[in-house]
Each structure stands twice: as structure tokens, then as C-alpha cells.
Image (spheres, rainbow, N blue to C red):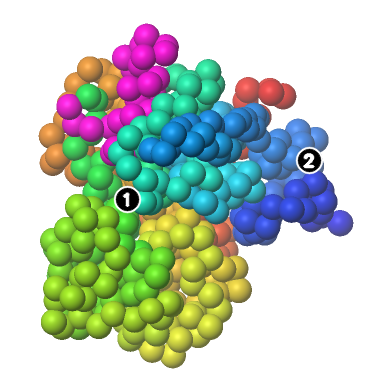
Amino acid sequence: MSYVDEVLARVKEKNAAEPEFLQAVEEVLNSLRPAIEANEEKFKKEALLERICEPERQIKFRVPWVDDNGQVQVNTGYRVQFNSAIGPYKGGLRLHPSVNLGIIKFLGFEQIFKNSLTGLPIGGGKGGSDFDPKGKSDREVMAFCQSFMTELCKYIGADTDVPAGDIGTGAREIGYMFGQYKRIRGLYEGVLTGKGLTYGGSLARTEATGYGLLYITNELFKDHGDTLEGKTIAVSGAGNVAIYAIQKAHQLGAKVVTCSDSTGWIYDPEGIDVELLKEVKEVKRARLTEYAAAKPSAEYHEGRGVWAVKCDIALPCATQNELLIDDAKQLVANGCKAVCEGANMPTTIDATEYLQENGVWFIGGKAANAGGVATSALEMSQNSERLSWTFEEVDSKLQGIMANIYKNISDAAKRYGFEGNYVVGANIAGFEKVAEAMIAQGVC
């Protein structure tokens, strides 16, 4: 049995109740086989894979808070500090009813390699809670965030662990958490990213993940002698990533015709109206039915269906495992040329393999959605220097980072005989830097 297979067997046995984490580990380790086998004896002696698959620290805690009726509610909070070989832990805080330890571990594991790909000194971590901010008043959200940070603040810091936003955690939540951290620790430091511009946030951070997704998609098409001009794009999601991916796609000459939320999806053959979408989702926090009601050209459909629309490019920007094998078959049948992931692991393994086998260019989330965490790291730099860069400065750095990520994942795939396989390329390129740092630092 190979070293990779030994480690996979142990991880599956030890984490049998965590399917998302197992899926992430299996996808990464299988694609790392060429790099592992080239150094198998050394890596096995160092127990490198065992160490990289085991979080350095897992924190689980209760979060009691009082709702508007005076009733005490209790949620569970998590922070998984996965790997600090190349820098302080960095990764978002997800607030969603689906959150459990396995999902946080999967996200933290993915974050190790994604953060490595940015070229910036940040390690991998993730956190969150099963709290649902939807339908809660601002006071209830503040009560939860203050309770959550009262415990979390013991384990984070500007040079230790720097959380950020994620699903359910936007500027409002980050603000409440930052205020509580400052209040308890007495420190005004860059301990969170995604902050408001008045207290240490970075311009272009809001747009970064969506913009970065389009920058790397643009690099992909340029490398194949093509352009985004005139292309039809299907996007899933209607949150931060989706909105700004749609905005940048339109700026680059493409037309986005779909978006979705947890109850249904929109098809708008005239192209998604970004300002209307922002009004519905960011201001009103409403369902997409309101978009359809305001835009005569738009069709609203209940449930799933985004990937049935004929498109040149598919950008899954909602959540994990949203693009299934049947969706992949539909995309191929409709002539889709590229799938680039704006969300974390939104495509199932069998769907990914089907797309690759049928000639669809596929860039996974570790590379394609790294623009968000890259700009978070740029926010950390500005905080450390007590500076604030212009939107253009940050956006220019982001474009350079995404272009460099594409080059590195393409080169890594070629080096190991997998030209055009950007999943293998991303995992190897991310892994090599982390592995070298771990070995250099000894057994720790």
C-alpha cells in the first residue's frame, strides 16, 4: 500500500462522521500522488501527510445569547487552527445552521493550500457557528457576536490567528465582533479582516473574491488564445462572491444570465442587473422573487436549475457540493468551455472528473476563489503598517496575485505531466510550499 493510501485509510477511520472533510482530504491527497511518490520515503519518515491532515488545534465552545423576547439561546462555536507553517492562521467565520466540526475542518484544510497559493505569509484556519443571522434583528446579531467573540478572543490575535467573514458573516457581524475583541483585550489591532473602512478595513475587500475569480478566468482564456468578450456566463449564488463576479464579468465584456439563492434562481437573458441584485440582497436582504418582480425580462424558478442554462462559462459561487454529476453532464451537453469555482468545493468529485474528461477547463476553488483571502492578507499588511491603500492599488495587487496563481498552477501541472489539469496543479503548488516550511521547522 502506498503512503497516500495508508494515510487516507487512517483519516477515513478516524473521521468517519465528517464526510465533507473526508471528501476534501481524498481530493487533495489523490491529486498530490505524483509529488508524494517522488519523495515518498522522506515524507513518510517525517509523517508529513499525517501532520498536514491533523489540525494543530480544534476549539469548540458554547455561545449563549439573549433574543428579543428575553429568551436565552445557545449555539455552538468553532475555530479550527489547521496549519501555521507559513504564517498565522487565516480563514473565515461561517454563520449558518449547517455548520458542524466536519465542515469547519474541510474548510480549514482547503484554506491551507489556498492561502499558500496566494504567495502571502498566511496559514490555514476556519471557524464559525450554527447560528443563523437570517431573520434576526441587529440587536440579536450583536448579542450573538459579542458572546461568540468573548470566547474566541482567547485564541486569536494579529500575529496568531486572523479570522475573516464568510457565509452569514458580513460587515455588520465583523464590526460587532471587532468591537467586542477590542473591549475585552484592550487592543486595537488587525485581528479581523473584512472590517469597515472607518476602522481598518481595505478598499476592494468586498469585491475581491468575485473580482479575483474573473481575473483568473480571464488568465485561463488568454492562455488558450481566447477572451471573455461576448461570452455567456451562468453564476450560482447571490451573495458577496456572486454579485461581484457578475459585476466584473460585465466589465470584461461577458454577459451573466443567472444567479440563485437558497429557494430558487433567476434567468435573465438581458443579463443580470447588478444594481438591482445589490438592492434586493444587500439592502433589503430579500429573496430573488423581488428581483423577478422588478425586472420584466427575468424568469424566477423554484429550486435548482442554474446549470441547465446554456452557457460558455459556469461559475459556482454558492456553497459546497452544489454542482452535481447530472449538472456536469448538462453543462457538457450545452457546450460549456470552462468551470471556475467561486465557492469552496462547490463541485462534487465525480462532477469534476466528468468535466475534465470531457475537455472542460476546470479551476478549483483553492485557486479560483483565493482573491478574497489574498486581499484579506493585504488588509493585514495595511493594518500592520498603519496605512490605507487606494482601491486601484489593492485591485492592481489582486490582479497580479491571481495572474501569478494561474501561472504557478499551470506550471506545476506541466512539471508532473498533467498539463491542463488545474486541480492537480493547484494542490501540488500549494502543497510544495507548506511541505518545505513544515520540514524546515522540524517536528512541531
Kind of residue indicated by mark 1: Thr
Q: In what quadrant of the picture does the N terminus appear?
A: bottom right
**Residue 300 in the figure: left or right of residue 58:** left
Check if residue 45 falls in the magenta segment. no
The residue closer to the viewer here, 422 or 312, is: 312
Tell me where residue 242 appears, x and y as whole percent.
30, 60
Q: Where does label 1 land, which residue?
A: 209
What is the span of residues highlighted in magenta in the rendered image? 171-198
Tell me where residue 276 appears, x and y as whole percent.
15, 64
The residue closer to the viewer here, 15 or 143, is: 143
Q: Residue at x 35, y 25 (%)?
A: 178
Tag 1 secondary structure: helix
**Residue 11 in the figure: left or right of residue 223:** right
Q: Is residue 404 visible?
A: no
Tag 2 secondary structure: helix
User: Magenta segment, principal secondary structure?
Assistant: helix
Q: Where does label 2 land, which residue?
A: 44
The residue closer to the viewer here, 414 or 252, is: 252
Q: Residue at x 60, y 74 (%)?
A: 350
Q: For the residue carrying disc 1, how many other residues have a C-alpha within 10 Å: few (<14), some (14-19), or many (20+)?
A: many
